[in-house]
Image: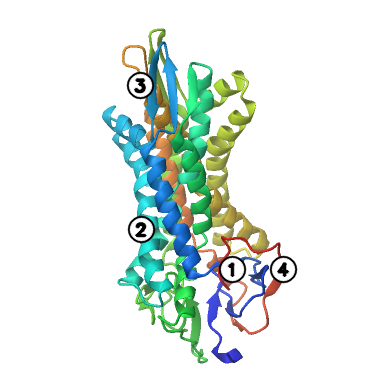
């Protein structure tokens, strides 16, 4: 393929445009401007990805069919699966917590696997899947909200917290969730852009290579990654439709500062009750007690589980506070029209995106404790108002990060241009199963 017919790719962080070429095993293509990873070499075929998705769906069924742990008190044993924990939380009247954990731990991961199977099956046979464009938009929406790894860590924390109170043993479901976490992490490499590249490679979708006229500017579709030319003088908030997938395309996210500030300030408001109100209430024959997030950390520390206490402190205290402060910094530096330290600010934004979902740890811990310690008349644990507020903080901060448009900060350095020079390449160890296709 000649250079002028090579597909184009846009860096999602700084909006630089590159020609996408084939990589050698172990190579990664990085943006020469901001340093973000553009694409990786992958040795996996569509059939390999399909096999991984099928295996993940089978393990998903096992993980939810069997208990993750069992607790024994005075001859009574209580087993709990994820679905048991959600059901008991709902029965106790904590519907917000039950819905949040049910969606993040069960419904959305199941839907994500279903979508992947829907598209990978036909693509592996060289056919375009029915509803391919809609499925890719749905996949892009689902990926950030699937929190199986967070739930797995929540199980481990819950087992440690209960170990000092009663005999607690892991169940088959715990091992299955461990395997599922590995498989979903691998499948997490299949972003909508990557799936569209596989569809290009088997020839079921077209590849457009636009040539920008002097009065046009190039931008990429957030759904399929197709780079296309838009009129330079057009309002950057005007609506356009992708030439390939028909998704709505904006040159930049409209009103991103207002939306990001609104969501962020709402998160700050909920952050106060999330830390002041109890996230967990315990009723037993010895009396009733309530625990805040910091109270739970102190309790773990006093039990001697300093390592678990540190994990909970990082996930439930340090991470949410870091996200709030980092987003405030990013917003202020853009409003001040600062062009300094753009690369470190890009790394900061990537960190905020990565740690977003891990703050849900304490919410999963609470519902598992409620399911395992469900001994009527002897002991009962239930979620507190702080758990619902904390879950809302997680959702609002994630939405706030998604609303922020880092490309506008890079725009202050000047308009992006098509760069034909090779991107930075750095040799990595032998490619793993989860690497993206170049």
Q: Residue at 43% of width from left, 72% of height from top? A: 124
Looking at the image, is mark 3 or mark 2 earlier in the sequence?
2
Mark 3: secondary structure: loop
Contact between marks 3 and 2 (CB within 8 A): the answer is no
| Residue corresponding to mark 4 | 426
Q: Residue beneath label 3, please?
A: 374
Figure quadrant of the N terminus: bottom right
What numbered label is drawn on residue 42? 1
Q: Position of residue 426 (x, y in %)?
A: 72, 68
- How far apart, in angstroms, are the residues tagged by discs 1 and 4? 15 Å
Q: Residues within 10 Å of mark 2 (few under 14, many from 20)?
A: some
Q: Which quadrant of the structure image shows residue 437?
A: bottom right
Residue in the picture at 42% in, 70% down = 223
**Which structural element holds mark 4?**
strand
Q: Are marks 4 and 3 in contact (CB under 8 Å)?
A: no
Q: Nearer the viewer, mark 3 or mark 2?
A: 2
Q: Earlier in the sequence, mark 1 or mark 3?
A: 1
Q: CA distance from mark 3 to mark 2?
A: 33 Å
Q: Is residue 272 visible?
A: no
Q: Residue at x 41, y 81 (%)?
A: 205
Name the quadrant containing residue 192: bottom left
Choose mark 1 or mark 3, whichever is in front. Answer: 1
Instruction: First in sequence, mark 4 or 3: give its number.
Output: 3
Residue 63 percent across, percent down from the top left: 42, 41
Element assignment for label 2: helix
Q: Position of residue 230 (x, y in %)?
A: 44, 83
Name of the residue lying farthest toward the top:
286
Disc 2 target residue: 114
Label 4 to label 2: alpha-carbon separation: 35 Å
């Amino acid at each position: 393929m000649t250079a002028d017919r090579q597909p184009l790719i846009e860096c999602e962080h700084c909006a630089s445009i590159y020609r996408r070429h084939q990589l050698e095993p172990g190579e990664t293509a990085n943006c020469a401007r901001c340093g973000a990873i553009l694409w990786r070499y992958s040795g996996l075929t569509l059939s390999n990805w399909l096999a991984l998705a099928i295996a993940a769906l089978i393990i998903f069924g096992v993980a939810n069919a069997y208990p993750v742990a069992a607790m024994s008190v005075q001859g009574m044993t209580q087993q709990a699966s994820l679905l048991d924990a959600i059901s008991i939380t709902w029965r106790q009247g904590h519907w917000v917590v039950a819905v949040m954990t049910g969606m993040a731990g069960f419904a959305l991961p199941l839907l994500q696997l279903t979508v992947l199977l829907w598209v990978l099956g036909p693509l592996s046979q060289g056919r375009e899947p029915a509803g391919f464009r809609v499925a890719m938009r749905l996949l892009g929406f689902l990926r950030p909200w699937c929190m199986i790894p967070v739930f797995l860590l929540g199980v481990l924390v819950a087992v440690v917290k209960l170990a000092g109170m009663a005999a607690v043993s892991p169940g088959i479901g715990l091992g299955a969730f461990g395997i599922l976490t590995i498989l979903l992490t691998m499948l997490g490499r299949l972003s909508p852009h990557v799936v569209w590249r596989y569809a290009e490679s088997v020839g079921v979708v077209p590849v457009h290579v636009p040539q920008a006229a002097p009065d046009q500017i190039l931008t990429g579709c957030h759904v399929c990654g197709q780079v296309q030319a838009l009129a330079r003088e057009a309002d950057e908030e005007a609506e356009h439709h992708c030439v390939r997938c028909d998704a709505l395309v904006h040159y930049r996210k409209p009103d991103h500062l207002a939306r990001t500030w609104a969501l962020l300030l709402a998160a700050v408001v909920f952050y106060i009750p999330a830390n002041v109100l109890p996230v967990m209430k315990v009723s037993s024959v010895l009396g009733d007690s309530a625990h805040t997030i910091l109270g739970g950390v102190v309790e773990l520390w006093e039990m001697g589980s300093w390592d678990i206490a540190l994990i909970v402190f990082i996930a439930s205290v340090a991470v949410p506070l870091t996200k709030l402060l980092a987003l405030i910094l990013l917003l202020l530096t853009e409003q001040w029209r600062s062009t300094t330290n753009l690369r470190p600010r890009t790394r900061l934004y990537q960190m905020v995106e990565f740690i977003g979902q891990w703050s849900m740890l304490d919410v999963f811990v609470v519902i598992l404790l409620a399911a395992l310690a469900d001994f009527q008349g002897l002991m009962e644990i239930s979620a507190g108002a702080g758990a619902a507020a904390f879950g809302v903080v997680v959702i609002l901060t994630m939405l706030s990060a998604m609303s922020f448009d880092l490309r506008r900060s890079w725009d202050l350095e000047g308009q992006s241009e098509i760069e034909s020079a090779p991107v930075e390449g750095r040799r990595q160890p032998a490619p793993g199963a989860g690497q993206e296709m170049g």
